């Protein structure tokens, strides 16, 4: 047990060190993210040492259970592919340009438009995709308009990670924890919509308090940002597939269809129909090729490796001991705060895998309340420090590339002020509505 726990703690420590100090390795022209390599080494160490027998790992990964990591990965990667495709055809950049064009010369109006646009897109797509798309755009228009980009960058990041918990498909942590808890799409939505609205309104209010003075300055010169969709046919295909997938996932429980099969089916259908469309139009399917390479495939070895690490801890009863510490009553506040802090120690994906095992012994309303509390924490915990989520690490790296000064301390200062009240609001509403 001591060896397994040590490997887990060392792996988590190295993960945090990697994302902070050497996130990517360069081998010639090839760049490799270090976080999944470290997780893989930790998992292989436990397997090869016999602390987590390979037959048990294979049994879990081929089981017909809710926490089968292969099914969860398929669901998430398929939904991500649909969102990335829309980004490739220019959908998100087009909406961003329309938003900017509607702002006039008032920064306050632009602030609220940005928050609303990012929030709405995040609900139906993916927080990571929205962040990766909007961040360079914000850097561009802020530089050309001669305004401080920080209020808009922080607002975008907060909005994406506050409203990503509205639907189960908004964040991989939602998918993993909800699936592990046997929670369907509609049940998830009905329980999480009010906590999400509460967290969203509180985060918006806190952002307004932080930046209201800076936003009083007028926009003197707005850059030209008129963008057009190059191929509206591909846009229609992308929107139809994303919309159809979302609707079918919402009623999956009534159709007795697993969500992962629905999402995989729509992703494959999009690639086939878009390929045929491009063939008919006699053009190269560049958007599809770019989509394929932009899907975060590295999450597969990362999540599977973390699953092996947590399976080992579960095997030796360590997760049960944590359940004992947090209590079998499933306190919404206690589980939410514990998960929130754990996000910023080991990142929200490892935290979600770990807590999925911690939550297993709970039953009834205790299990329901604690699961939703951990889900809320997995989203809002990403706002506290850059360590909280991979999105934070990617966001900070984009700012460095754009020569925007924003330190770890700056992130934590703004993150603490915004995320803590938002989390408490979400947990309070969740406790009241359960």
Image (tube, helix red, strand yellow):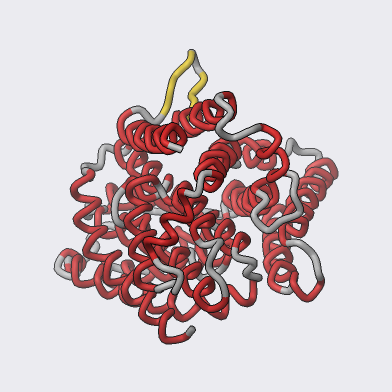
Q: Residue furthest left?
A: 213
Identify which residue, 363 or 81, lies in the foreground. Answer: 363
Look at the picture and state if 348 lies above or below 430.
above
Question: Is residue 109 in view?
Answer: no
Number of marks drawn: 0
Image x and y of residue 175, in percent: 58, 59
Which residue is drawn at the image coordinates 33% and 67% (left, top)?
A: 110
Can you name the residue that lies furthest to the top here?
28
For the residue pair 188 and 217, the one nearer the viewer reads as: 188
Judged from this view, the residue extending furthest toward the bottom is 432
433 to the left or right of 155 = right
Left or right: 256 with respect to 82? right
- The structure residue drawn at horizontal position 67% and vertical position 32%, both measured from the top left corner, is 54
Q: Considering only vertical position in the picture, is 119 above or below 202?
A: above
User: Is residue 160 left or right of 421 when viewed as pictured?
Assistant: right
User: Residue 216 versus residue 17: which sits nearer the camera?
Assistant: 17
The percent position of residue 344, horizontal first and vertical second, equals: 33, 50
Which residue is painted at 81% across and 48% down in the image?
277
Query: Residue shown at 83%/41% (left/top)?
Result: 279
203 sits left or right of 196 in the view: left
State the residue in front, 318 or 400: 318
Above or below, comparing residue 306 to residue 118 in the picture: above
Q: Position of residue 284 (x, y in %)?
A: 74, 36
Where residue 124 appears, as percent x and y from the top left, is 57, 65
Q: Is residue 361 in view from this perspective? A: yes
């Amino acid at each position: 047990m001591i060896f397994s726990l040590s490997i887990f703690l060392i792996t988590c420590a190295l993960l945090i060190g990697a994302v902070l100090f050497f996130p990517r390795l360069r081998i010639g022209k090839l760049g490799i993210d270090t976080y999944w390599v470290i997780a893989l080494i930790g998992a292989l160490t436990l397997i090869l040492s016999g602390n987590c027998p390979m037959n048990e790992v294979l049994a879990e990964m081929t089981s017909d259970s809710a926490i089968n990591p292969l099914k969860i990965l398929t669901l998430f990667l398929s939904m991500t592919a649909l969102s990335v495709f829309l980004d490739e055809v220019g959908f998100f950049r087009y909406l961003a340009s329309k938003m900017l064009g509607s702002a006039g010369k008032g920064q306050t109006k632009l602030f609220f438009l940005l928050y609303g646009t990012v929030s709405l897109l995040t609900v139906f797509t993916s927080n990571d995709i929205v962040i990766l798309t909007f961040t360079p755009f914000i850097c561009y228009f802020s530089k050309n308009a001669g305004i401080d980009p920080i209020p808009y960058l922080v607002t975008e990041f907060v909005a994406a990670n506050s409203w990503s918990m509205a639907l189960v498909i908004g964040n991989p942590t939602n998918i993993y924890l909800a699936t592990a808890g046997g929670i369907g799409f509609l049940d998830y939505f009905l329980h999480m919509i009010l906590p999400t609205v509460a967290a969203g309104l509180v985060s918006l209010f806190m952002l307004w308090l932080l930046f209201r003075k800076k936003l009083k300055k007028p926009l003197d010169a707005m850059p030209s940002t008129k963008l057009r969709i190059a191929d509206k046919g591909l846009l229609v295909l992308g929107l139809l597939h994303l919309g159809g997938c979302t609707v079918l996932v919402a009623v999956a429980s009534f159709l007795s269809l697993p969500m992962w099969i629905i999402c995989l089916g729509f992703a494959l259908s999009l690639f086939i129909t878009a390929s045929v469309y491009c063939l008919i139009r006699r053009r190269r399917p560049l958007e599809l090729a770019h989509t394929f390479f932009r899907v975060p495939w590295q999450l597969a070895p990362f999540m599977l490796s973390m699953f092996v690490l947590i399976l080992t801890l579960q095997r030796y009863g360590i997760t049960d001991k944590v359940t004992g510490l947090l209590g079998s009553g499933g306190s919404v506040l206690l589980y939410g705060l514990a998960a929130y802090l754990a996000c910023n120690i080991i990142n929200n994906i490892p935290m979600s895998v770990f807590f999925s095992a911690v939550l297993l012994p709970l039953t009834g309303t205790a299990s329901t309340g604690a699961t939703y509390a951990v889900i809320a924490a997995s989203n809002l915990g990403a706002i506290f420090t850059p360590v909280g989520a991979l999105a934070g690490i990617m966001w900070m790296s984009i700012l460095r590339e754009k020569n925007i000064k924003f330190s770890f301390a700056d992130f934590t200062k703004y993150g603490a002020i915004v995320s803590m009240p938002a989390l408490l609001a979400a947990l309070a509403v969740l406790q009241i509505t359960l």
